[in-house]
């Protein structure tokens, strides 16, 4: 749908997005004290995996603030995230860290010329080496530099080598004669055939050499090398905030604005509630499971668009230090965001002080128990103060490791080690390395693991800073 905003004038409803974290509880208290007007409703989107402390605060705010003020609190959800992630018929994702299984690679310390003196690639390599430092000759090799630098004469030469009838000097000369630069050529494009022909002449060759297995057609062989253990690292996309938070909130807003619930037969399972999930079918499996689209209900219930002109003002609790997360990209035809804490110029620290002064010092950060965005400090706190939650996430992390159809393994901790073995007490990223390989992605992950993000998971902003959009949500 379009994110074009047509919501103007007086809002039909004022709705507060209530995450039960520091900023949203601050907003609730500001309402109670009359420093903010009363919204028509508050909405809590429940991933099903918040810490017990967050649910306790939610209940307390409802009891002590919302109910006495007559503000209805809607608790909405779109499933239970930790169950859905492990369910092979759902394949829902959280932004986990991924690592390939360790594998061995040979790292060459020193190269020498191919020992076979008849090898044409060796001759080309000698020409290249002789040309080093000679500007004029070097320019002849510029196009092939990539191949040379990669320790591989393939690339450019391969192109001709793979077409044997074109590989002779005569053919290359003929081809070079037809070459004309055209306007699509990148700057620096040169006559490849001419470059290859010149290289061949300099090497005393009459054609592109035959493949030579001994040097893998490089003209070079390794004379000294060592083995290294490597793993490849990455991170999975984050769609969970959209699925589990933004989507149910917007649906509730549409419902409150008068959008009608429409029921259609689920076309993904032809109304049976069961199907072979497409990702299973792709792997040639035919296991029938619960349809993930209708959740086995056979029908899909969607709340349609509200009547024209009806729109809600959505209160989002970003504080001044989160200004970078503010975006209007989440606005829709029927909702427009408002940031009361920014209007009051309140920072996160001011919110914390404000809460403490009013006896609300136990407000926790709102985020899923096993969210991979947790910092080491947060993991340590959980391990040391909440053994039940810690045991749960350690068990989840183990169950999370392998996903069907995925080559890489998944981890909750950036070190890509099991959570109960992860170096959450170690503060020096370089001490965490499991191999000698310098991997920038890995190093960045480790830095993030220690520093983390001070704010909770907001439906309106990715924890890694990028705004969440409502595309295909509403
Ligand atoms: S807290 Fe983490 S896992 Fe939970 S919805 Fe937000 S980003 Fe996803
Ligand atoms: Zn060779
Ligand atoms: Zn279905």
Image (spheres, rainbow, N blue to C red):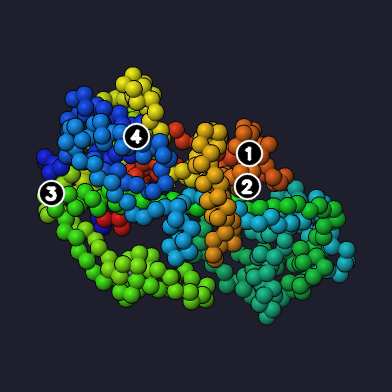
Mark 4 neighbour class, 10 Å CA radius: few under 14, some 14 to 19, many 20 or more: some
Mark 3 neighbour class, 10 Å CA radius: few under 14, some 14 to 19, many 20 or more: many
In x, y percent, where is residue 326? 33, 38
Where does label 4 land, which residue?
Answer: 57
Where does label 1 land, which residue?
Answer: 423
- Extreme-bottom residue of the structure: 165
In x, y percent, where is residue 423? 63, 39
Q: In the image, is 215 to the left or to the right of 141? A: right
In 3D space, how far apart are the residues under numbered discs 1 and 2 (Cα atoms)? 8 Å
In 3D space, how far apart are the residues under numbered discs 3 and 4 (Cα atoms)? 32 Å
Where does label 2 land, which residue?
Answer: 417
Question: Cβ of disc 1 within 8 Å of ligand 1?
Answer: no
Label whose residue precedes the other's in the sequence (1 or 4): 4
Quarter of the image with the C terminus is bottom left
Label whose residue precedes the other's in the sequence (4 or 2): 4
Residue contact between numbered discs 1 and 2, judged by CB atoms under 8 Å: yes
Q: Residue at x 41, y 33 (%)?
A: 364
């Amino acid at each position: 749908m379009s994110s074009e905003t047509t919501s103007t004038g007086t809002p039909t409803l004022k709705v507060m997005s209530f995450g039960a974290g520091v900023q949203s509880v601050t907003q609730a208290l500001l309402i109670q004290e009359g420093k903010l007007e009363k919204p028509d409703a508050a909405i809590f989107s429940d991933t099903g995996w918040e810490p017990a402390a967050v649910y306790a605060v939610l209940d307390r705010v409802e009891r002590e603030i919302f109910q006495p003020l007559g503000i209805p609190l809607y608790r909405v959800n779109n499933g239970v995230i930790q169950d859905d992630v492990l369910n092979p018929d759902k394949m829902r994702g959280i932004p986990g860290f991924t690592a390939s299984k360790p594998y061995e690679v040979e790292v060459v310390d020193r190269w020498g010329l191919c020992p076979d003196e008849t090898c044409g690639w060796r001759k080309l390599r000698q020409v290249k080496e002789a040309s080093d430092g000679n500007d004029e000759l070097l320019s002849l090799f510029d196009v092939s530099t990539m191949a040379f630098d990669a320790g591989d004469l393939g690339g450019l030469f391969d192109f001709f080598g793979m077409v044997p009838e074109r590989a002779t000097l005569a053919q290359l000369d003929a081809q070079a004669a037809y070459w004309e630069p055209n306007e699509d050529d990148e700057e620096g494009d040169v006559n490849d055939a001419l470059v290859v022909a010149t290289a061949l002449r300099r090497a005393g060759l009459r054609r592109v050499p035959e493949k030579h297995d001994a040097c893998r057609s490089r003209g070079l062989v390794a004379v000294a090398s060592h083995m290294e253990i490597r793993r490849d690292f990455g991170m999975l996309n984050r769609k969970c905030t959209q699925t589990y938070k933004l989507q149910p909130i917007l649906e509730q807003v549409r419902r409150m604005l008068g959008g009608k619930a429409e029921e259609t037969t689920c076309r993904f399972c032809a109304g049976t509630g069961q199907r072979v999930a497409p990702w299973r079918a792709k792997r040639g499996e035919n296991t029938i499971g619960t349809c993930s689209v209708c959740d086995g209900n056979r029908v899909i219930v969607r709340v349609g668009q509200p009547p024209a002109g009806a729109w809600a003002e959505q209160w989002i609790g970003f504080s001044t230090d989160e200004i970078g997360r503010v975006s209007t990209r989440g606005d829709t035809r029927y909702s427009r965001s408002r940031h009361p804490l920014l209007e009051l110029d309140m920072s996160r620290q001011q919110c914390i002080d404000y809460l403490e002064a009013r006896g609300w010092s136990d407000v926790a950060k709102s985020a899923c128990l096993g969210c991979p965005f947790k910092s080491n400090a947060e993991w340590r706190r959980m391990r040391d103060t909440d053994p039940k939650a810690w045991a749960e996430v350690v068990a989840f992390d183990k169950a999370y490791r392998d996903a069907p159809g995925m080559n890489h393994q998944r981890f909750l901790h950036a070190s890509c080690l099991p959570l109960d073995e992860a170096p959450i007490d170690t503060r020096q990223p370089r001490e965490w390395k499991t191999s000698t390989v310098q991997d920038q992605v890995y190093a960045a992950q480790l830095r993030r693991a220690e520093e983390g993000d001070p704010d909770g998971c907001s439906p309106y902003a990715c924890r890694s800073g990028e705004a969440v959009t409502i595309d295909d949500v509403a």
